[in-house]
Each structure stands twice: as structure tokens, then as C-alpha cells.
Image: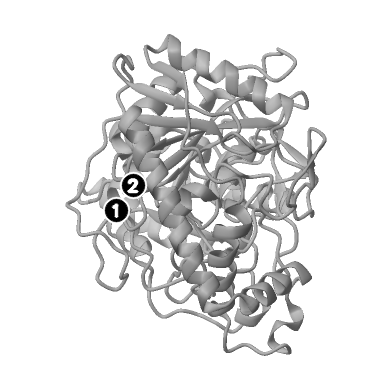
Amino acid sequence: MTDGTGRTASQPAPTGLGALSATEIIAGYKRKAFTPRDVVDDTIAALKATDEACNAVVTPMYEQARAEADRLTKAMRAGEAKGALAGVPVTIKDLVFVAGVPAYGGSPMNKAFVPDVDAAVVSALKASGAIVTCKTTTCESGYKLTADSPVTGTTRNPWNLDRTSGGSSGGAAAAVAAGCGPIAIGTDGVGSIRVPSSFCGVFGFKPTFGLVPRSPGFSPPSWASLAHTGPITRTVADAALALEIIAAYDLRDPASLPVSPRRFDTNAGPLNGIRIGASVDFGYAAVSPDVRAAFNKALAVLESCGASVSMDGPGLDPGILEHTLKPIAFTEQAAAVASRTSADLAGSEADYRDVVSAGRHYSGTDYVEAGYRRGQARAAFLKLFERVDALVTPTVAVTAFEAGQLGVDRIDGATVDPHLGWSPFTWPINLAGLPAATLPCGFDRDGLPVGLQIIAHWLDEPTIFKIAAAFEQAQPWSKFWPPLALHEQSRAHVKA
């Protein structure tokens, strides 16, 4: 995998145990090469260094993590440790509840809020033996595609600290990219798992809407019909392992799907017989030249893996952002803070207040009409999946921009909406509720990662994992590390 200039962008891997994949950590435990306390100590060292540089951590849970690591270390020595993720460190986005730990959700209004119950995904992870190390940064209520907030400030990208990590699961992606543990849990309402994963050069998975329960709720519960929960990892196998654990039926979430436990095959094999549709711009989106170039190279990789690739797409309405997404997303965001006054919102960002104001001005008719248009978009994807098994697009139309900015308003000479227009490929997938993943597929001329998005039919996560595993084998991105991770390795506490 090379950057936009053709230079090889690979670097040596950091030596800290926190930079290992979950599967490598589990294998190391079986060999008795190290203990959970060793792994957690290294992970905490990396988290502290990354937080200092990138501002990725909201609430450290280091003492709790060390105590749980000590308990599991004793259990492993006694042969009593249980769970598919026993001793594996994970981070949790601050929109997801951890009992007894503040859940600011990027909002000044939530500074006193401490949930007394774990979210369903956290309960599942703890039951699997995973060790929660911290809560990671997000923007206020997940309303935008960076992780900057009035509570935590600006979250930065470990590939270049002058650039954004993306968001709203920006702290999660930055931490995984910098080697601070193999698995992070994020949420995705308009691209908030896939955008930061793309910007930070890691693998992010948004499952089918309802596959992973969101109960007992977000903080506050915004983007009700759009938000998904899923993993951010460095490898395909780690994402599959995490998704197997957190995908479950939960009556507390009315959108939860009553599906049986699932297992995902991530053994790489040829893609013979797989029909992939490809669209670089959905027929109307502005896309940067570097992203276009990386996307075209990615298509060649897929073809070399045996896939049949054709230029195809859903044929979406070019007005889908203004006439479908915004009436739904902004109304749901406003509804989440319907009881809040202007005084309550005074500490919020001006852009957030603008979204809430816009949401309050849409009528019920506007919201319902947008729902009809949403149904038309869903039907367009249904027709597409009669012709292809999967769709690939760029994940984001640009690479990571200047930290502290809402977004960009121009791409390749074209004017775009600075809030959501530079990520035209992510939020249509939320509107449809489809599963989608992003994987690293190259670099721009500045050495910043570019992402490839893979989309499949409802509940067809296996096809995404099959394609991603084949691409990973052909272009193994996990050997590529940001400079920050290499700097951190000297701080990590390493035990052979």
C-alpha cells in the first residue's frame, strides 16, 4: 500500500503489547508469553501518551482496568479464565453507558450525569472477559463528523497532529490507530464509525441497523432512527470477533433484531463469483483527486482477488442531503434535547445550536415526507442488490482536514455543505440501515490514509467480511503505523 506519490508508507510496528491485535493477545495468553496485567500496563501507557498528543480520552478507567487485569491474571494461572475476549483491552465511546462512569457525550449539559447501568454492548464485552480501559472522545451528542466538543476540546489525528481524527468516534479511532488496544466501540449515525476509521487508517464496521442493541440509550438519545453501534479495530478478524459478541437481541431497544447469535468467517480466500458494484461519486458527489486515485487502485486489487467489478450504484436523488437526511437527522437531534432551554444550550457549540434550531423548525409533515424519500432510497438499494452482491465507494470524499474545523466547504473546485457534504457516501447507508465497513486502501499526497467503503445487503455482514479479508490479505494495512504510535513505543512497558 502506497501513498498518493507512490512512496511506500510502511513503518516498523510499535513494540508495546497494546499494539497487538486481539487475536495476537489471545494467542499470547495461551502461550503464557505475557499476562493481562502486562497487556493492560502497556495499553495504559500508550493511552496516556496518545491522550497527551491527540486528546482521545474523556474518562480514564485505569485503576479499574488494572484490578480486572490482576483478577484475570490469577484466573488464567489457575486455568479458570473464561470468555472469548478474556484479558483483551477495549475502549468505549462516551455516548455509550458504562455503569458508574460519567457519560458526558460531549455535552456541557451532561456534566453531572453518571449512568447506573451498562449499555448492552458493555455488558456483553464484560461477560466475554474484555477489560474496559477508558471512555473516548466524541462531539456533542454525535452531531458532526469530528470528535471536538465543548467538554473535551479538539481531538487530533495520530498520522498528523495538525489534522482532525474525524468523528464522532474520533477518540476511539485515534486510540486504535496509535496502538492503544485492539478494539474500540463506536457509534455511527451519519458515518461516525467509518469517517474517523478512514481518517485514522483503521478498520471500522457499522452493522445492519438493529443487529447490535443500543440500549439503554445514548447520552442524550439522539439520531434515534439512524444510529448504529459497532467496532473499530486494526484487523478484520478482530472486528468479526467483537461483532460476534455484541450482536444480540435486547427488548430494551425497540429496533433490536431478534436474530440468533452469529459467527463470521474471516479466512481470506478468492472472491470468485462475487459481483461488486463500484461508484466513485454516486453520480453527483464531489471527490478529491487523491481519493479518486486510491479508489481506482483499490478496484484493481479487488479484481486481482477474483471479484467481478462493474461501475454501478443505487442512483440516489442528488437532493438527498437537504430533503431526506437533514429533516430526519436534525429533527431527531432537536427532539433529543426538546426539554432543554436556551440557557441549557448556552455552553454548546454554535454549530450544534444551529442544528437543534433547524430541527425545531422542521414540521411533522417535513419529517414524514423525508421518511417517504428515505423509503425510495431504500428501494434503490434493493434494486441494486439484485444486480450485485456488494457496493464499494470511497469512505469519505476527502482525507483528514485541519483539526478544529467543522469540515470543508470546497472539494476539487466544487462547493459542498461543510457539515455533511464532504462525507456523501456514509449517511445514505444509515438512511437505508445497511451494513457497511471501511478499510484502509491507500494514502494521499500528504501521507494521510484513504478509506474504501464496502456495503452489502441487509444482514449480509458475511459478504463484507469476505471481501475485506481478501483485500487485507492482498494489501495488509495493519503493518502501517502512524508516526505517533512509533514515538509511543519507547514509553510502553514491554515484557517478553
Answer left or right for 12 relative to 217.
right
Badge 2 is on which residue?
Answer: 243
Instruction: Please determine whether, in this image, residue 239 is positioned above or below residue 478.
Output: below
Instruction: Please determine whether, in this image, residue 206 is positioned above or below residue 363.
Output: above
Q: Position of residue 275 (x, y in %)?
A: 35, 22
At x 61%, y 61%, the residue is 138
The Cα–Cα distance between marks 2 and 1, rounded to whole angstroms, is: 6 Å
Visible residue check, residue 197: yes
Badge 1 is on which residue?
Answer: 247
The amino acid beneath tag 1 is Ala
Answer left or right for 79 relative to 383.
left
Picture quarter containing residue 358? bottom right
Image marks 2 and 1: residues in contact by CB distance under 8 Å: yes
Q: Where is residue 494 in the image (x, y as percent from the top left)?
A: 54, 37
Q: Position of residue 194 (x, y in %)?
A: 54, 44
At x 49%, y 20%, the residue is 476
Q: What element carries label 2?
A: helix
Q: Locate the N terminus by quadrant.
A: top right
Q: Residues within 10 Å of mark 1 (few under 14, many from 20)?
A: many
Q: How crowded is mark 2: few (under 14 residues within 10 Å), some or many (20 or more)?
A: many
